[in-house]
Amino acid sequence: MNIAIVGATGNVGRKILEVLEKKNFPIEDLYFVASSKSAGSKLKFKGKDIEVENLENFDFSKANITFFSAGGKISERYVPIAAQQSVVIDNSSFFRMDPDVPLIVPQVNSNHIKNMKKNIIANPNCSTAQLVIILKPLHDLFKIKRVIISTYQSTSGAGKAPMDELLEQTKLSLESKKIVSKNFTKQIAFNAIPHIDMFADEGYTKEELKMVNETKKILDKNIEITATCVRIPVLVSHAESINIEFENEFTIEKIRNALNTAEGCVVIDERKDGGYITPLEAEGKNETFISRIRKDNSNNKAVNLWCVSDNLLRGAALNSVEIAEAYIKNK
């Protein structure tokens, strides 16, 4: 396959490169594409230097599959152009709720790829991706009625500049110097900010509504879901506290077994000090880790659990490449 990566110099673009190389993805020609600012620079792939080309005049007919990881405004402008000549896998939010664009997590709904009508496949929000990979096997067994979720999201979900600012603010804070936030609404170092993306309807943020709408589109429109999304001072990996209410009877043992045997999931849940996974430990790993599995002591039809996943991998680069694999397999 001939592959192009738009936004190749960004956080997710570089991770896509890593995933393609680790998977030994079948590539004949590889094209790196970015803004005019990055055009002419070089990136390595399998020890070979490849020059970054300018997005403004790139010929998309050279690529069988094009990954877009350059933000919603770039996708809005250039994805329709690319999709005339290449299958596009888009990481932005722009096309996710388009009824003619399948929104895919391969372990959950790869069969929806056949519904593609515009030569575009959307990758979900990073928090949604790690959520639905857990919900799917449980929904199949016990039928999910409602989900209440609180997220603890790393700064990498907002890009490289916010990651750099976390490091900068941490240093300033330790030196008791004044902090002026640039990429966050409030200080992020040694803090937690209950606000990701813009405010939308009824006091919810766009990030929270993405989780609701995308989960319904990917898994089941009848599942009720509500979310609170929080940015925390962590560089990589998102954590989620999830309460799941079922329609059918369940046991903790059946839930453990279902998750431990689900593709992409690993249960690490010992009821002792340190018997769970934290964001730091999930960084650089492909799996979504599930811990703290326990019955909701206020509702005998519900369970509480904690999950952690590398948002740059499961939520973006890894999921994108797995979409490409599923597309090749199903075409």
Image: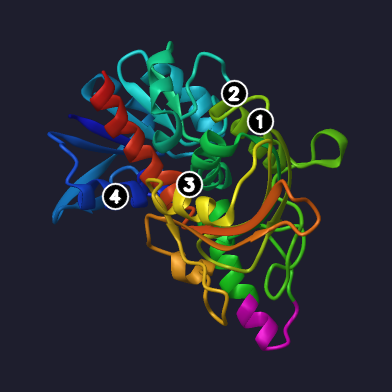
Closer to the eye: label 4 or 1:
1
Residue 74 on image: x %, y %: 50, 31
Can the viewer see residue 116?
Answer: no
Closer to the eye: label 1 or 2:
1
Query: Disc 1, disc 2: CB below 8 Å?
Result: yes
**Residue 213 shows which numbered tag?**
1
Q: Residue at x 64, y 61 (%)?
A: 294
Q: In this picture, which residue range is highlighted in magenta?
A: 170-178
Can the viewer see residue 9?
Answer: yes
Which structural element holds mark 1? helix
Rendered view: 291 above or below 201: below
Q: CA distance from mark 3 to mark 4?
A: 13 Å
Which structural element holds mark 4? helix
Query: Disc 4, disc 1: CB below 8 Å?
Result: no
Report which residue position mark 3 lands on: 315
Q: Amino acid at mark 3?
A: Gly
In the rendered image, residue 36 lying in the magenta stretch gets the answer: no
Q: Earlier in the sequence, mark 3 or mark 4?
A: 4
**Residue 25 shows which numbered tag?**
none
Q: Earlier in the sequence, mark 4 or mark 1?
A: 4
Label 3 CA crowd tier, 10 Å (few <14, some 14–19, many 20+): many
Q: Earlier in the sequence, mark 1 or mark 2?
A: 2
Report which residue position mark 4 lands on: 19
Q: Earlier in the sequence, mark 2 or mark 4?
A: 4
Q: CA distance from mark 4 to mark 1?
A: 28 Å
Q: CA distance from mark 3 to mark 2?
A: 17 Å
Q: Quadrant of residue 210?
A: top right
Judge left or right: residue 218 versus residue 241.
left
**Residue 97 shows which numbered tag?**
2
Rendered view: 11 above or below 108: below
Label 2 CA crowd tier, 10 Å (few <14, some 14–19, many 20+): some
